[in-house]
Amino acid sequence: MEEIMSQMINGVKSRYSYEETVERIKSKTKELGWSVIGEHDLEEKIGIKLTIVEICNKDFAKRVLERPEDRWISAFMPCHFSVVENPDGVYVYGINMGLFGKFMPERLGRVLMDVSKVDEEILKSII
């Protein structure tokens, strides 16, 4: 099971501080034409330095939601990145949308492949 999860989740170690990593994710998201629609700092609630950054692009969202029979995919929206401070540094985790897309109907899979390219660009901005 652990092997499957390591493939389904992209994880990278940031070369920046925790706060700068969060800011760089938000900045790169906007630079790529996406919107940051939520930011959840969970440290006070769970005692671990963890921020979830939610992102969305209305054009991508419309493409996957335009058909009522495909709206179940909304359970996976919005896209998000988890920024976590571990003992050996700051890590960012997100769903591997490219791999996830391979399990979707072809039309949805194509959109998720496009989303995965955006995710890759965001992750590249912090490594």
Image (cartoon, rainbow, N blue to C red):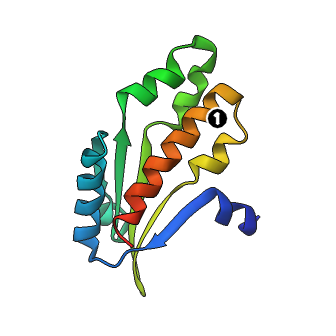
Q: Is residue 31 left or right of residue 127?
A: left
Q: Residue at x 39, y 26 (%)?
A: 59
Horizontal and vertical percent for residue 111?
A: 55, 33
In the displayed structure image, the side of residue 127 where residue 71 appears, left or right: right
112 left or right of 49? right
Residue 100: x and y, percent?
65, 45
Residue with the mark numbered 1: 109
Say what amino acid the circle numbered 1 marks.
Answer: Gly
Q: Quadrant of the N terminus?
A: bottom right
The front one of 30 and 40 is 30
Where 60 sits versus 35, above or below? Answer: above
Residue at 28% over, 50% down: 39
Number of labelled discs?
1
In this view, the residue in front, 125 or 52, is 125
Q: Residue at x 35, y 43 (%)?
A: 55
Q: Residue at x 30, y 58 (%)?
A: 25
For label 1, the SS is: helix
The answer to whether residue 98 is above or below residue 48 is: above
